[in-house]
Amino acid sequence: MITLIVLTFVVGYLLIALEHPIKINKTATALLTGVLCWTLYIIDSQTTETVNSELSHHLGSVAEILFFLLGAMTIVELVDAHQGFRIITDRIKSRNVMTLLWLISFIAFFLSAILDNLTTSIVMVSLLRKLIKNDDMRKFFAGMVIIAANAGGAWSPVGDVTTTMLWIGGQITTINIILKLIIPSLICLIVPLFVISLKLKGQTLEAIDESESNQIETTAKERNLMFAFGLGALLFTPIFKTITYLPPYMGVLLGLGVVWIVGELLHHEKDEEERKPFTAAHALSRIDTSSILFFLGILLAIGVLESTHVLSDLAFRMDKTIGNQDFIVVLIGLASAIVDNVPLVAAAMGMYDLETFPTDHRIWEFLAYCAGTGGSVLIIGSAAGVAVMGMEKIDFMWYLRRISLLALLGYFAGALFYVLFA
């Protein structure tokens, strides 16, 4: 039955990849794959209570990500409704493609280390919509945002969920992981940027005419306040987690509540019709719910692979047959482009104990880099990628043709630097 579960997952994965040729929405395929995998698992199980308990456990973990995504996207939509991002976009005057690409990528890289790669990708895609009119070029920039956000998240304890896992588990310390991984992570971004720059040299972007926007004009006070509270809410999320030890989605929901109230107070004197475009209810209606359901389906499917020990067995098998730790970690990073990096890192944490590999051992540092950046190779290999895929309607095969090789070059370049010089 395990073989059938794996086969179902693989077929579902291929159907997601071929969404456009077969004309079946990836969300429907992901939901079907997730439910079928769990159905096969419970049919084969002798104790249905155990399977239901495991499902509840995984659903709890998935729900944390979904509520985080929902809260962050709503905050971003509220800021956008008040034209808060004009504070940034009005200051970006360059229409040179190469200059803008480097600027956007480096903003995403460092912002991801402060927030996290998922939140950063949501914010940056919202910014791109204000800067780039051409859909295909905006998708290209969004692909680079995925690489930049994942690279930026790898060297920060709060930047990527797997780095956070290693940090909480005691495998890494804050200062050491920053010092050891910031240069490999920068290389992971700079290499694809350099390759792209050779292709885009001299190209310019068409300016977006603000008069074409359907948004209602807001005052400078409204824009500044909502931008400050929105960004403050997102920046406070990792601080809230550190102080309270509550999961990140609680911090985002707290921030959403505050931003929601600020928005209500700003427009309390207006009538219902005038207030509507600025309300959280309207912001929620603008969110792409299908991308959230896609997340649910794909993460549930991966949960079965974790519950059936397919991933942990794979990790142990690699350790026995390959032996070389650096090579194993590189393979784990590449595998995280196909399946979720969280169970892969969890399996590695169980495979290598702290007594043999103490805190800040190079295996933990290298694992943080590879698991954090390897997901960029495929668009559904990271939370940032899935979020951008939903927001910009990026096709799996489009990303594979246009971005994957660039991400792979950056991944190997950063890994090679770490192996040689760390």
Image: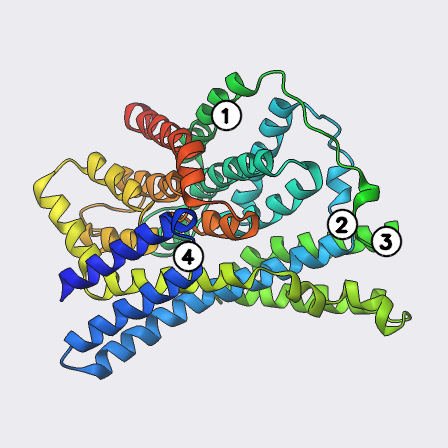
Which quadrant would residue 5 be assigned to in this image?
Answer: bottom left
Residue at position x 23%, y 51% in the image: 348
Label 1 vs 2, first from the N-terminus:
2
Percent coordinates x, y for residue 262 in the rendering: 77, 65
Label 1 packing within 10 angstroms: few (<14), some (14-19), many (20+): many
**Label number found at residue 385:** none
Marks 1, 4: nearer the viewer: 4
Say what secondary structure mark 1 lies in.
Answer: helix
Nearer to us in this view, 39 or 50: 39
Distance (Cα) linking label 3 and label 2:
9 Å
Q: Which residue is mark 4?
A: 24
Residue type, mark 2 in image: Gly
| Mark 1 / mark 3, whichever is N-terminal | 1
Q: Residues within 10 Å of mark 3 (few under 14, many from 20)?
A: few
How far apart in space, not on screen, are marks 1 and 2 (Cα)? 28 Å
Residue 65 % position (x, y)? 46, 62
Residue type, label 1? Leu
- Name which residue lies at 67% across and 23% down: 204
Q: Position of residue 341 (x, y in %)?
A: 33, 51
Up the image or down, 364 lies above or below 256; here it is: above
In the image, residue 90 sits, relative to residue 308, either above or below, namely: above
Specify the amino acid type for callout 3: Thr
Q: Going 68% across and 63% down the picture, which residue do you hit?
A: 283
The residue wearing badge 1 is: 193
The one of 273 and 52 positioned closer to us in this rendering: 273
Task: Work out which residue is located at the far front of the displayed protein and give it.
Answer: 22
- How much space separates mark 1 and mark 4, taking CA atoms? 33 Å
Tell me the residue that label 2 is attached to: 84
Quadrant where the N terminus sits is bottom left
Q: Which mark, by number, is residue 218?
A: 3
1 and 3 marks in contact (CB < 8 Å): no
